[in-house]
Each structure stands twice: as C-alpha cells, then as structure tokens.
C-alpha cells in the first residue's frame, strides 16, 4: 500500500524532477530547484496557515474562558467552543492542510529518488525488469533494498560489461547519471555507511562527510522550530507542548534522514531553510504574536469604552431623574405656597384661624 502511494505521487513529481534535471544537469541542484519550486507552489497554503495561526491566537483567550467556565460540563464547553469557532469563522483543520500536503510530496520525492532509472532516465519498466533479472543472476541483492534501482545503477557503473545485454544506449544513460553533489554521493544511505560504537572502525566512519546531511537536516529543523516558537505566543501547558515539539521534530528529522538516501536528506534540509526564510518574510507582514497582541489590546479598549459608556448612561439617567424630581418638587412647592397665600387672605378677611397646608391638601 505504501509503495503504491509513493508511485502514485511519484509520477507527476518525477516529471517535475526530470524537468529540473534537464535544466541544471545536476542531481543535487535538481533537488534544490525542485524544493524551491514546490515551496513556491505551496505559498497560498502557507499564507492560509499563517492566517489560521493568527486567528487561533486571537480566539485562544476566549477558548480558555469557556473551558474554565464550563470545566465541569464538557458537553456544554464543546457546544460553546463550536459556536465560538462558527462566530469567528475559524476552522481547526485549516492550519493542518499545508502540513498534510507535505506528506504526499515527501512520499513522491522518495519514489523519485528511490527510482532514478524510471523517473530521471525514463527507462521503461520492461528494461528495469530485465536489469533486475540480470542483477539478481549476478548476485546483486535488490529484493530487500529500499531503493533497488539505485543498487542496480551502482552495480552497472561498477561492472558495465556484465550488463551488455541491456544495450549501449541504456548503459550510456546509466553511466552518465551522476548522483554526486559537492563531493557527496546522494544515492548513499547514511545508516549503511555510518557505524556507532567505541571501536576505532566505528569512530572512523563518523568522519564520513555524508553525516553532514542528517546533521544539517536536524539543525535546520531546530532553527525552524525556534523561528516558529518566537512568533507563536502560548501559555501554560501549551508552552511545554511547544518545547517538547521543538525538541522532537529535529530528532525525528535526524533519524529519518539517516534511514533514507542522502538525496532525501538534502531535500529535507533545503525545505527547512526555505521554510525559515518564508516564515521570516510572512512574519514581517503577518506576525501572529504582534497581530494577536494588537487585537487583544483593541478588544480590551472596546470593552473599556463600553464600560465607560454604561457608567455615563447610568449617570445621565440619574441626573435626568434628579431634574425631574426637582421639577416635580418645585411645582408642588408652588402649589403649597399658592394655597397657603389663599388661606391667609381668607383668614384675615373672615377672621378665621390660619391652618398650615399639608401634603394631603395638595393631593
């Protein structure tokens, strides 16, 4: 199944790699050019992932509030979170898409590098099958190899006369395929030439320059993790998770590039370098940390304005109530005085006893 997936994605990428090889006539530079081109094609998805990261940073405090408020009711918390995602137009899977697309590219690249006779030299399947039979009859072990075509290609270069039945054109093609780059054989599996141990022979293999590719892959993966963490603010347990991821990804990169041909390690290294440059450029225009902090500051400012507006509204309502009360009291007092003056005049005119005006008299 895995082999089938590699071949399906390897077919279109094989033609792309072949085109790169025709331009630069160098296996190593073809891989570098291939990496840059695929990264450029993925820029729209990278921008989408960056915006998704920014959106996540903006709504994260709201998510934490919901989780804290409904910590004893997971179902309600999940419902509130789903409403929040819908209200903020946020998708949890949006940021994962570019990462998922990387996997078929890697699978396809593995197939391209594992099968240079098929993809770069365009040797037919029947001829590859004939070459496999010849190699097997000559004792070349290809069945258990990750990259039997590389094994057979190296065997042809070592003893071309033994494969004369393939024809001059095929032999010329295979012998003309140079997989060296800056003095490194990119068809080599680092784990097959590097030995780990305390004996002198093992220590000697550690000086093999091919080890530079896995180390560079690990170092550039670490650099990419550092750049990502610097511009991705997190808190609490998220910091611990990010720290663990920052360590795990470079180690996985180191292990992986030891187990595959050095050409894959070169792709992985260049891919990390391009990703770092791409991240620095995008962070200059869409920095998740700065934009999230700005949005949070604007949100706090908005809440403060709303709070002040409520205070002012209550104050105005209170003042308006006092004015109305004063107006009402003033009218009542005026009625009291008019009634009192009338009673005084009547008392003087008719000799009656003056009676003070009460509130009941004003009803």
Image (cartoon, grey):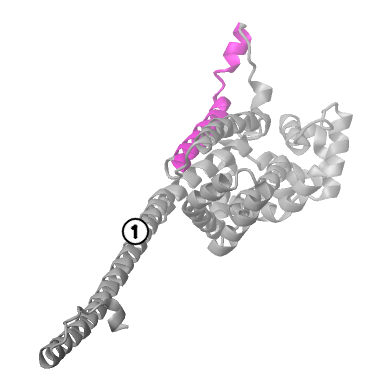
Q: Residue furthest top?
A: 199
Question: Which residue has dot 1 on it?
Answer: 304
Disc 1 secondary structure class: helix
Whether residue 40 is visible = no
- Which residue is at the front of the view, 209 or 250? 250
Q: Which SS type dominates the magenta stretch?
A: helix
Indicate whether residue 209 is drawn in magenta. Answer: yes
Identify the image quadrant of the N terminus: top right
Whether residue 37 is visible = yes
Q: Residue furthest bottom?
A: 349
Q: Position of residue 147 (x, y in %)?
A: 75, 36
Identify the image quadrant of the C terminus: bottom left
Estimate how packed mark 1 is, as few (under 14), some (14 to 19) or many (20 or more) residues with alpha carbons within 10 Å. few
- Which residue appears at 69% of the width and 49% of the height? 104
Task: Please give the range of residues in magenta.
Answer: 200-229
Q: Residue furthest left?
A: 348
Q: Total label count?
A: 1
Q: Position of residue 197 (x, y in %)?
A: 63, 11
Q: Position of residue 337 (x, y in %)?
A: 17, 83
**Vertical position of residue 183 compared to residue 113: above or below:** above
Indicate whether residue 66 is drawn in magenta. Answer: no
For residue 43, side relative to residue 72 (left or right): left
- Which residue appears at 86% of the width and 28% of the height? 138
For residue 162, side relative to residue 51 (left or right): right
> Based on the displayed image, in which of its 4 quarters is residue 348 positioned?
bottom left
- Which residue is at the front of the view, 174 or 305? 305
- Which residue appears at 23% of the width and 76% of the height? 326
Q: Position of residue 3 (x, y in %)?
A: 80, 43
């Amino acid at each position: 199944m895995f082999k089938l997936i590699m071949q399906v994605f390897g077919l279109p990428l094989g033609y792309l790699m072949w085109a790169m090889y025709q331009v630069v006539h160098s296996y190593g530079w073809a891989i570098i050019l291939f990496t840059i081109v695929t990264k450029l094609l993925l820029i729209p998805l990278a921008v989408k992932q960056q915006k998704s990261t920014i959106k996540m940073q903006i709504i994260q405090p709201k998510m934490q509030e919901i989780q804290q408020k409904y910590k004893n009711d997971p179902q309600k918390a999940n419902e509130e979170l789903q409403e929040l995602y819908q209200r903020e137009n946020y998708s949890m899977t949006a940021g994962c898409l570019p990462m998922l697309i990387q996997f078929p590219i890697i699978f396809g690249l593995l197939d391209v590098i594992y099968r240079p006779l098929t993809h770069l030299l365009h040797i037919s399947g029947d001829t590859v099958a004939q070459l496999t039979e010849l190699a097997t009859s000559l004792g070349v072990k290809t069945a258990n190899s990750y990259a039997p075509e590389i094994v057979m290609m190296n065997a042809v270069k070592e003893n071309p006369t033994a494969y004369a039945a393939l024809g001059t054109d095929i032999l010329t093609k295979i012998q003309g395929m140079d997989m060296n780059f800056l003095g490194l054989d990119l068809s080599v599996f680092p784990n097959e030439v590097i030995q780990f141990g305390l004996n002198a022979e093992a220590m000697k293999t550690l000086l093999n320059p091919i080890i530079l590719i896995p180390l560079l892959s690990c170092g550039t993966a670490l650099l990419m993790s550092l750049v990502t963490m610097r511009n991705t603010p997190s808190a609490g347990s998220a910091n611990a998770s990010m720290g663990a991821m920052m360590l795990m990804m470079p180690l996985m990169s180191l292990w992986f590039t030891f187990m595959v041909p050095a050409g894959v390690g070169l792709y992985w290294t260049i891919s990390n370098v391009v990703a770092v440059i791409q991240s620095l450029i995008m962070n200059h225009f869409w920095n998740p940390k700065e934009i999230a902090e700005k949005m949070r500051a604007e949100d706090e400012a908005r809440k403060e304005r709303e709070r002040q507006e409520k205070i002012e509204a209550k104050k105005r309502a209170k003042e308006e109530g006092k004015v109305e009360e004063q107006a009402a009291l003033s009218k009542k007092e005026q009625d009291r005085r008019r009634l009192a003056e009338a009673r005084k005049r009547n008392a003087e005119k008719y000799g009656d006893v003056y009676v003070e005006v009460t509130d009941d008299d004003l009803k």
